[in-house]
Structure formats: C-alpha cells, structure tokens
Image: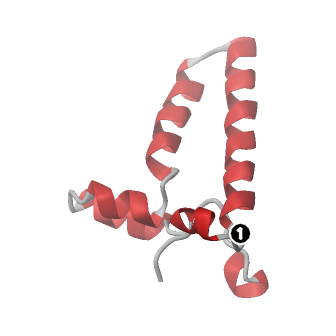
Amino acid sequence: MLYRCTGLLCFGCGCTRAMQALVQGDVAASLAYNPLMLPSFVWLAAVSLLRGRTQRVTLEAGLAVLLLFMLLRNIPVPCFDCLRPPC
C-alpha cells in the first residue's frame, strides 16, 4: 500500500514472496525478496522470550534496524539495490 501511494518500499515489501519461497525451500530466493525477513523471526523470538528492560532494549534496537533498512532500501544508489525486492 505504501509503495502504491508513495513509491517508497517499506521494510515489509517482498515478505509475502519471501515467505512463499521459504516454504518451498528456496532460502536464496527468500533472502532476495526481503533479506531482513529471516533475521526478523529470530528478533521476534528473542523479544517474546525476554523480560523487563532487556526486552524493551531489544525491541527498540530491532525497530531502529527496521527503520534503517527501510531508509537504505529507498536510496537510489547501486550498492543498496540488493535490499530491493526483484520486480
């Protein structure tokens, strides 16, 4: 929805195709569609297992990584093309 309205990729763009590729056993294609999806599963598991201040710091750090990823994948520089999902 964000891409259709603004032309910007969010941190979740490509996740549906990445999940489909992962279910089919194609990890390389999954990482090509959204390289942050698999690490996000580990991060969410860590956040759900931690308690107190550690949980909050982990959550905030993860959200900062997601926002940085979103920013970098929208910069039109060839070195960041690997962060964009294939068409």
Tag 1: amino acid: Asn
Looking at the rendered image, the quarter that the N terminus falls into is bottom right
29 to 76, vertically: above or below = above
Q: Quadrant of residue 21?
A: bottom left
Q: Quadrant of residue 65?
A: top right
Judging depth in this view, the residue of 56 and 8 nearest the camera is: 8
Q: Quadrant of residue 12?
A: bottom right
Judging depth in this view, the residue of 44 and 69 nearest the camera is: 69
Residue at x 48% of width, y 41% of height: 39
Within 10 Å of the Cα at label 1, are there few (<14), some (14-19), or many (20+) other Cα atoms?
A: some
Decide if residue 70 is on the left or right side of residue 20: right
The spot of residue 77 in percent (x, y) is 68, 70
Residue at x 51% of width, y 64% of height: 82
The spot of residue 67 in percent (x, y) is 74, 51
Q: Residue furthest front?
A: 78
Identify the element where label 1 is drawn: loop
Count the labels in the image.
1
Decide if residue 8 is on the left or right side of residue 29: right
Decide if residue 11 is on the left or right side of residue 85: right
Looking at the image, can residue 1 be seen?
no
The spot of residue 86 in percent (x, y) is 46, 77
8 to 66, vertically: above or below = below
67 to 64, vertically: above or below = below
Judging depth in this view, the residue of 61 and 82 nearest the camera is: 82
The spot of residue 11 in percent (x, y) is 64, 59
Residue at x 78% of width, y 82% of height: 6
Looking at the image, can residue 83 be seen?
yes
Q: Which residue is mark 1?
A: 74
Decide if residue 46 is on the left or right side of residue 74: left
Residue at x 56% of width, y 62% of height: 83
